[in-house]
Image: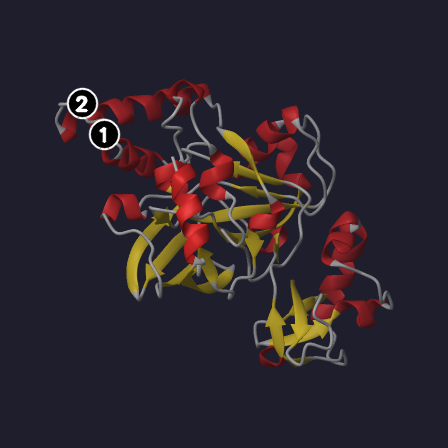
Amino acid sequence: MGTLSASDRTDPSGFPALVTPEGQAADVRAAFGEPALTVRGLLERWDEFLPRLRALATDGGAVRRPLAEFRVHAPVEPRQVFQSGANYRKHVIDLHVAHRAPSDERSEEERREEAAALMDRRAAEDLPYVFIGLPSAITGPYDDVVLPAWAQQPDWELELAAVIGRPAHQVPVDEALRYVAGYTIANDLTDRATVFRRDMPQIGTDWLRSKNAPGFTPLGPWIVPAESIPDPGDLRVTLKLNGETMQDESTKDMISDVARMVSYASQSAQLLPGDVVLTGSPAGNGMHWGRLLRDGDVMDGSLTGLGAQRTRCVAQSVPEHVAASAAEVAP
């Protein structure tokens, strides 16, 4: 299931579509006789619509058109985006080593041991790390990603994202997956240079600055119903940069699984239909490889059973006087 619009721009806002493995798309609005239906509206009535979507998928008489005739948007416009940090053991250990403080003279082995002990403790305590992202950062799975002129270390973070299908508040872990309508792919781009506040280290991280530039969260291409993904804890996460594999890891390396992540977020906030919960990025980010994103780079991201996205990086074009002003306030 995704959000499409006609390539001739007659419907630029997009419409909910059922997409088949054969590359055909059916307009869900027309099929269900609901011309104002959106993907979020469909998710708000997920229990009602899921059986109808199953029937539409097998309806040989349904009107379908080639997917190539349409533009693919992000599959949903969420009201809330919940992001997870430090949720893959190998990834956190790699970042711990890469972000060595100038005054830290310990060997790489010692720092890896320290990070491994920290991850083991977090796994034992079962306490996820969740923060809030902005819906305005979301873009389509094939759209260009503009790298802001101020971003000194833009990095990729391919992730599994859970899409909420029922209001969820203070749900227990063993019931949390009942609130997940389906899954999709997210690339949660991060400017590593602005993650930590340099002017005031004691206040910690600055996720607004580092993660929420427009287009910093390519999402999609599709929402695959949860019933079609029997084990979200056993999917392959793969990202290629200009054809070279950078991330290739299983979701088995998660410290907190999807159910735990959804349950934890729901203890503080009410999750709404259409919201997305990003579950963290595995090892293989740019900081690990010593290679950050730059103009012209192409990222190909895929997860088992969820399709693939392709995004091209484009450097922001900034007038000279604006660039000078931005440099004055850069951290």
Question: Residue at 73% of width from left, 79% of height from top?
Answer: 60
x and y percentages locating residue 68 in the rendered image? 58, 80
Question: Residue at 51% of width from left, 66% of height from top?
Answer: 142
Residue beneath label 1, please? 100
x and y percentages locating residue 49 in the rendered image? 78, 56
CA distance for labels 2 and 1: 6 Å
Q: Is residue 193 visible?
A: yes
Q: Is residue 303 visible?
A: no
Residue 24 sits above or below residue 115 on the image: below
Q: Which amino acid is tagged 2?
A: Asp
Disc 2, disc 1: CB below 8 Å? yes
Left/right placement of residue 8 relative to residue 144 reads right
Left/right placement of residue 54 relative to residue 194 reads right
Left/right placement of residue 68 relative to residue 238 reads right
Q: Which amino acid is tagged 1?
A: Arg
Question: Residue at 40% of width from left, 28% of height from top?
Answer: 197
| SS label for mark 2 | loop
Residue 47 sits above or below residue 114 on the image: below
Residue 250 sits above or below residue 139 on the image: above
Residue beneath label 2, please? 104
Q: Nearer the viewer, residue 225 or 275?
A: 275
